[in-house]
Image (cartoon, rainbow, N blue to C red):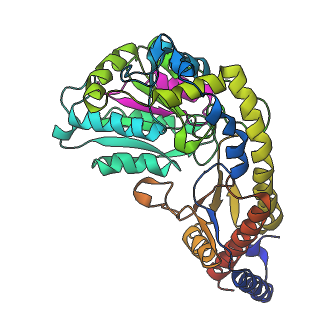
Amino acid sequence: MAYCDWTKAELAAEKAAVAAHFDALKAQALKLNMARGKPGKEQLDLVSGILTVIQTPEDCQVDGIDARNYGELTGLPSAKALWADILGCKPEECFIGGNASLTLMYDTISKAYTHGLLHSETPWCKLDTVKWLCPSPGYDRHFKVTESFGFELITVPMTPTGPDMDMVEELVKDPAVKGMWCVPKYSNPDGIIYSDETIDRIAHLKPAAPDFTLMWDNAYCIHEFEGEFVPFRDMLTLCREAGNPDMVFEFASTSKVTLPGAGVSVMAASVANQKYMEKLLSIQTISYDKVNALRHVRYLKDKAHTLELMQKHAKILAPKFRCVLDSLDREIAPLGIAQWERPKGGYFVSVNTAPGLARRTLALCKEAGVVMTGAGATFPYGVDPQDSNIRIAPSLPPVGELEQAMDVFCTSLKLAALEQLGA
């Protein structure tokens, strides 16, 4: 029965019991961190073979190139072919970067700001106002990138099928709106897959700004932990067919495939965009780490082999997500104080508490030794208007520790709700 249907006496008794359990949890002096979506040790150990796929100087020869040397700014042809296979685009549309796709995203925004993009009339730094669309709840690091350049961030509500497209189509009529962040498959944090209709409407946008930029962060493109691989349409092709060939920049990386600290990223965009960006990037760097890119080519081989690896990751991740969802179903669902998504891929579980409970819940979690992503982080400027959304990252802790962390979380949420009810 939901807390709102309990009598005052029942709520008071419940609060006393929950507070006592909370004090017992605090006494355990736990130190558990669920703040970021880091792969756990078992996942890292799973892919340790990537460290030994290159052992001799001869192993560094590929595509007629010595991967140890300078040059090949846009990346090894074989690395481009691998990413094109995974993403469904063309090799010539791929630029191979370092270990973090976030760096490539930042560079794209930075270069738009200082130099303008292919279709910019002027660098964005010379404009009075730059506005940016932020589907929310969303990825905090995305929002911080555009906020750091002084853009005006506009919250676009997420729906079960992706961003509110009626709102997006209206907002892009403003020429000051220069772009939008998107995590189209297993969105961070909700785990939503954009519907075909939403993707088509995005591809067919007619923005007033000629340099409107769709930042398509396909971070979880192959990251199922339940069920079979879900194919996803190539946004570069869709935008090209819709008459917007240069509107989209797509990003991905192997951060949750191999080693996050030593992975390989990709920026996929039209050939025209690639040529323009190459001129700017050639001033910044001579080349990224081609030896590491070659390690990935040798280890991952192709899309089919990579998907086999991802099924091994899924066997490690699935019990962790089940632990989180089972705890929420058992401890929170009957009380009517929160709702949550049930993702089948990605790296997070998104919980929406009753309004006004997120900050207090997370403060209690921290008090009991469990660190989670800060309240508000999934909204622009770190401000959740409902003080409701909480992002749970189950991937790092072993299941045993995760069970402890979820005990702390559920107890903290109950206590926060009881406090709000005046129990």
Q: Could you tell me if residue 309 is visible in this image?
A: yes
Q: Nearer the viewer, residue 418 or 381?
A: 381
Q: Residue at x 80, y 34 (%)?
A: 227
Give the image quarter of residue 52: top right
Figure check: 190 above or below 114: below
Q: Which residues are magenta?
A: 194-220
Compared with residue 158, is residue 216 higher up or lower down, i.e. above or below? Answer: above
Q: Position of residue 117 (x, y in %)?
A: 28, 27
Q: Quadrant of the N terminus?
A: bottom right
Quick check: 8 left or right of 126? right
249 lies left or right of 261: left
254 vs 16, left or right, is left
For image coordinates 64% across by 77% down, the residue present is 416
Residue 169 percent across, percent down from the top left: 43, 32
Q: Residue at x 66, y 75 (%)?
A: 417
Whether 195 is among the magenta residues is: yes
Which one is in front, 408 or 7? 408
Would you identify the image quadrant in which residue 248 lies?
A: top left
Residue nearer the viewer, 267 or 97: 97
Query: Is residue 142 located in the magenta-colored stretch of the structure?
Result: no
Residue 279 location (% of width, % of height): 27, 22
> Could you tell me residue 235's position as x and y percent?
52, 22
Residue visible at 31% across and 42% down? 131
Q: Residue furthest left?
A: 126
Q: How many marks?
A: 0
